[in-house]
Image: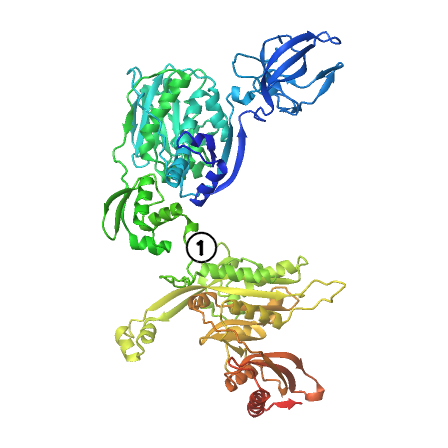
Amino acid sequence: MKISYNWLKQFIDLREDAEEIGKLLTAAGLEVESITPYETIKGGLQGLVIGEVLTKEKHPNAEKLSLTTVALGNEVVVPIVCGAANVATGQKVVVATVGATLYPTAGEPLTIKKAKIRGEASEGMICAEDEIGLGTAHEGIMVLETQLPNGTPAAHYFGLETDYIFEIGLTPNRADAASHYGVARDLRVLLQRELCKTSLHDFKVENQNLPIKVVVENPTACPRYAGLSITGVQVKESPTWLKNRLKSIGLNPINNIVDVTNYILHSVGQPLHAFDADKLANQTIVVKNLPAQTPFKTLDSVERKLAATDLIICDGNSTPLCIGGVFGGLESGISNGTTNIFLESAYFSPETIRKTSQLHGLKTDASFRFERGTNPDMVLPALKHAALLIKEVAGGTISSEISDSYPTPIKPFDFLVKYANINRLIGKEIDKHFIKRTLRALEINILSENADGLRVAVPPYRVDVQREADIVEEILRIYGFNQVELSENLATSFLANFPAIDSNKVRYKTANLLASNGFFEIITNSLTKPAYAETLGLAAENNVEILNALSNELSVMRQSLVLTGLEIVAYNINRRQKDLRLFEFGKVYQKTTKIANEVAKAETGNAETASTIVPETAPTTKIKYSEKVQLALYLTGSKTPETWQHKTQKVTYYDLGEAVANLLQSLNITDYQQVEIGSGNNENAYNSQLFAYGITIVWRKKEIARLGLLKPTLTRQADIKQEVFYAEIEWDYLTEKLSNQFNYSELSKFPDVRRDLSLVIDKAVSFDQIQKLARQTEKNLLQNVHVFDVYEGENIGADKKSYSVSFILNDQSQTLTDEAIDKVMDKLIKVYEDKLAAVIRK
């Protein structure tokens, strides 16, 4: 948002420079992002002064040139060669001195230098208006009627002033500051000076020649609507002062009527709209909603289809004239032939304007303010001020009373504020007199006061101040954030709980983790073939069948993700994309059917009671449908692309295991058990049908994942000839059971100690068993257990393997001694020899 320093001076006496004002505004929450000088005429006429022609002679070497001497004040007289026919002795003229840069109306800038023109010295230039950017005339030099002394800056004569434009990063909550008057209100509090308000005493209704009837059919969307008519206006170019005001903040002047409405908007924050009154049918304005898809051509000559929720300003025939608070219509706007106008000033519902603006993609200065909340009490003052300005710049007569539809006045926000809470939230005790003075200066009325606090009434235009904490923020930003000292010991009177776990955020985090490790996400169809269930060892009667299926190929909901994912793997391999890392979050579905007394038995735990509830003679069934989200991972092909530096390596089961372990660790799941598929404790038809080998992961007595190498019979069925490693994770269960509680412990001040053992054990022994035994044996000093080498060969026996295992030890209270370390290692050696029949290689 652009704010003019000189424009601000209309509302408040500013003695500080623009830089200081910018610092004050930023400290108070209106962040000034930049301050840019602005000149109404480029260059600001720097180096141009008023001079007086003392002598004029004909140039000896050029018929059309004259030799002049010009007095520039302080007894300075310079020779200037001039080509203008109208130059004469005694004239007051504009002189560009040596070193000045001219910015002509057309053409490139020109810097004045000492020169010889046709052999005669010239030390300056007597200027025409187009040569200094003041106009287009070039018939001769400018001759001034002035008594100003020679040497007076030309900028002073022409009334030019250098302005400074603040670029303010306005936050969405500060709609009250979206104008020069709004910014001046903050400066009033910061500088403790009074505002200069525009006098409206000269406003009066001069006749009743053009009364306009106003009907508001939707007062919810338009709580207040006011207007008046002005006759006999002359639409023309705006005066210089008005054009300069608008140009300074980046607006292009259009005509005097429209420019006044724009000026009022940026001056006091109240959008206005002017209609050609002669185009209003039945001299009536109706504020209403029109049927959906009603066509309407806006000022930009685009025909738009209106929505039923759009608030439309219509005439007496319900012809749309304007999208209320957003954009005007092409047919009813101000043109050069307009002589009578109806001037609108309103307060529209922010929700209505925001919805319409978003729907039509229209962002205007008016909608920007209306959708954030304007001041309903500014409707009439802005209307009167605009009417007086229009009379000043366009002539005309106010020819109707003000029509003001305001059935339900908007009340101030009324609530209590406690001194204790002000001091607690700010972190410092604030003087009560300062608090009350600040609130009154912010136009927040104090209705009552007691020892504990205040009851306040906040004006409706402060839409961001509706509760006690907002009042505290207002006091603090005026008091100054930098005025609040930091205490030596930071403390808080409130500690929030950890937020509840958001399953969507957990899923997004996991997807990012997988993607950062080279996985690509896939999405497959939940509809699949009925035969897939039998292929996977799942009961076909548990398929959820589709009514009116399009084909038998897509007639049931899938019970597993694996085969639909393999279709994607095959599709990519057939297109020479053989190195794949894929994942999918997908739903699986199942139907279970039980006889009613079996259900009752399951629910009561008693067969006799069940038969009482559901007699044997009346068997019924109970069907239950379930769906859950699973996470599937697929690995196949090579780990990395083949290069001249590294030979390619095929992915292995351990690559998949690492990905699953990292995923679980990211979810803070570490206390799980691994059970080999096919072992006595892990007989499962689905797992056995799925994997050639692999493991299941058990957490809190629930199988949460299964992973391994898919059986070749399964992959060949999908026309895949290379190995595919697959993991399936019960995602819904994981996210349901996740905890947001964490345990923290101090980092040890003492060094870790590493000891290695080489164990020769049976091939059936897993590393998981080695790790569990270690943790059961030493619970205090053992920190981590890692395997760093595996060996199998004839040297140790056909049914044996060797694990090289490292043990990390640490004592939180002291540095470990050799004696303590040896004691731990001896215990580990003994338990491995006793429990696993391990041979320790030394």
Picture mark count: 1
Answer few, some or many: residues within 10 Å of disc 1's Cα (few below 14, many 20 plus, some between 14 and 19).
few
Residue 692 percent coordinates (x, y): 59, 75
> Is residue 1 depicted above or below 687 in this figure?
above
Give the residue number, with chain letter if any, for mark 1. 548
Does residue 301 appear to the left or right of 138 in the view shown?
A: left
Q: Position of residue 514 (x, y in %)?
A: 56, 62
Q: How is the image coloured?
A: rainbow
Q: Is residue 266 left or right of residue 285?
A: right
Say which quarter of the image contains residue 138.
top right
**Residue placed most toward the observer, 357 or 716:** 357
Q: Is residue 386 above or below residue 168?
A: above
Q: Where, by quadrant of the figure, is residue 439 drawn?
A: top left
- For image coordinates 37% across by 19% down, the residue present is 341
- Looking at the rendered structure, the secondary structure element under dot 1 is loop
Q: Residue 288: in sight, yes or no?
A: no
Residue 754 visible in the picture: yes
Image quarter for residue 67?
top right
Is 752 positioned to the left or the right of 305 in the image? right
Instruction: Residue at the far front: name it.
Output: 75
The residue type indicated by label 1 comes to Asn
Q: Residue at x 63, y 64 (%)?
A: 719
In the depicted view, which residue is nearer to us: 353 or 318?
A: 353
Residue 570: give x, y in percent of width and height. Answer: 62, 61
Q: Position of residue 451 (x, y in %)?
A: 23, 52
Q: 236 or 441, which lies in front? A: 441
User: Which quadrant would the C terminus be assigned to in this image?
Assistant: bottom right
In this view of the protein, which residue sits in the foreground, 125 or 800?
125
Q: Is residue 561 above or below residue 809?
A: above
